[in-house]
Image: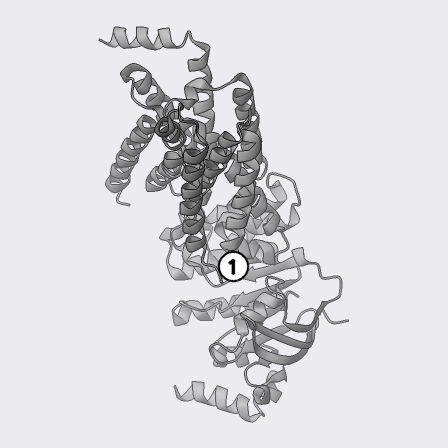
Amino acid sequence: MIEEIIVKIAESFQFAFVRNAFIVGILIALCSSLLGVTLVLKRLSFIGDGLSHVAFGAMAVAMAMSLTNNFLLVLPVTLISSIVLLHSGQNKKIKGDAALAMLSVGSLAIGYLIMSIFSSSSSNLSGDVCTALFGSTSILTLSKTEVWLCILLSIIVLAVFLLFYHKVFAVTFDEDFMAATGVKAKAYNLMLAAVIAMVIVLAMNLVGALLISALVIFPALSAMRVFKSFKSVMLCSAVLSVFCAGIGMLISIVAGTPVGSTIVMVDIAGFFIFGAIGLTRGH
Amino acid sequence: MPQIACHNLTIGYEGKAVVSGLNFSLDPGDYLCVVGENGSGKSTLMKVMLNLKPPMSGKLVTGSGLRSNEIGYLPQQTPVQKDFPASVTEVVRSGCLNRRGLRPFYSQAEKNLARRYMDKLGISDIAKRCYRELSGGQQQRVLLARALCAARKIILLDEPAAGLDPMAGQDMYALISKLNSEGITVIMVSHDIPAAVKYAGKILHIGKQSSLFFGQVKDYLKTEIGRVYAGLEEEA
């Protein structure tokens, strides 16, 4: 039994597209988990959800315009929305969560409408939508450019977190203090917004628009059950997320299940295990 | 030359002025206590002085070479921080960020500075503990240590004794006085008038136009509003 599984995995890994999917999956899991800690703590868990719907809408437009590279439209649109949302979070007149909900459902509706109007009768509309929302197979059909773009964006995200680690901590813990004591908190917030947009666009390929939030939230929440300093939560969240994504992808190869939802299932299992550990430690 | 001066300042929120015609100036080493009723704009004034909020009109001038990265700030606690997974050391060290520019990591000198202030505030023994598991008084000390790391010339405190029991409150005021005697300018917002008149050098009373006051504590106690405020608190 175990032998069969190993053989099956080994066979799959002979295909370049499986190896690509694995690399991209691990990188996305890593980036989104780092970001997740900050987002959950800033009470912005839902920004991933909202932005991914915006990205879905943009993707629909890109498909309708039959662009060769969807990234070129999806990334800028998501980036702008991300900056607007993060900024409106501080604007007391428009409540952050309401703005988010509005943008989220709005772009979902627009995206679906555009896809159904512009898709030719021969193409498979529900299949396209399903792919965009759940990422069912698109990670297995990545082009070489997409893989390199993904690697490049991941390096940027990781570099930002490494070089600005302490600033990310400060802007998460207390933005007002940071600004008051003469550090450019606004600039770091903007940087964070840019990183969020990048990760969302990347993650759409892996798990699809609907499940991105899971990738962002679960590892961070699991880590917070057990660990008590920012550094340990960050590290744990990253390791756990990579581990879950790896296991999830292997399971989906062996069992033939959809990649995105399998990864999320493993993340959920991880959350319950960490929750139990947290409880036994009397947390 | 004064360190901070306000000329005809009007502050408020959501387009409505709360206080107008504020004029005061502070020299290096002053200890100012801002008092007034709830909603009179004390915290808003604090935010304007910290550049977190623009004034509605008027001017706020800093002098004596005061730069924004020489300011320390003790804010009121936000709900986000109540369940934040951060160790005491991490929080205190983040006060050093304003001296680092783009350098990614803390230098040994900055780590030592953080340790010195933790020693001073008696929180060295809980340096590795998680911030969210501390008592209110301990959390307040942690935030004060962070503010001290950031404060090179001036420190602004928003209700530093809020949520502390009387003993811890006294300790807090004593600490702040000690800092002030070491040359750091202190600006404090407080409801606690007896403590304000006991420790502060100058009082700024804000509220209705007729009750605005700025000056020495002894002069404040001669005004009607000052007597009412200090007196009321004694009866209570």
Depth check, front residue: A121 or B163: A121
| Residue A224 sits in quarter | top left
Image point (39%, 61%), residue name: B136
Please state the horizontal and vertical placement of residue A216, each as a whole percent of the image.
Answer: 41, 37
Q: Chain of mark 1?
A: A
Query: Can the viewer see residue A239 in this picture?
Result: yes
Identity, as a three-letter code, of the amino acid under mark 1: Asn
| Residue A22 sits in quarter | top left
Pick out the residue farthest to the front.
Answer: A121
Query: Can the viewer see residue A36 in this picture?
Result: no
Number of numbered callouts drawn: 1
Image point (62%, 88%), residue name: B219
Pick out the residue farthest to the right.
Answer: B1
Depth check, front residue: B61 or B138: B61
Depth check, front residue: B176 or A218: A218
Number of other residues with Cα within 10 Å of mark 1, as a class: few under 14, some 14 to 19, many 20 or more? few
Please state the horizontal and vertical placement of residue A140, each as a whole percent of the image.
Answer: 42, 18
Please state the horizontal and vertical placement of residue B15, each as a whole percent of the image.
Answer: 56, 72
Indicate whether B75 appears above or below B208: above
Indicate whether A181 appears above or below A80: below
Q: Which residue is mark 1?
A: A91
Pick out the residue farthest to the left.
Answer: A1
Q: Quadrant of the C terminus of chain A?
A: top left
Tell me the element at label 1. loop
Please state the horizontal and vertical placement of residue B175, each as a whole percent of the image.
Answer: 53, 66
Q: Quadrant of the N terminus of chain A?
A: top left
Image point (44%, 18%), residue name: A141
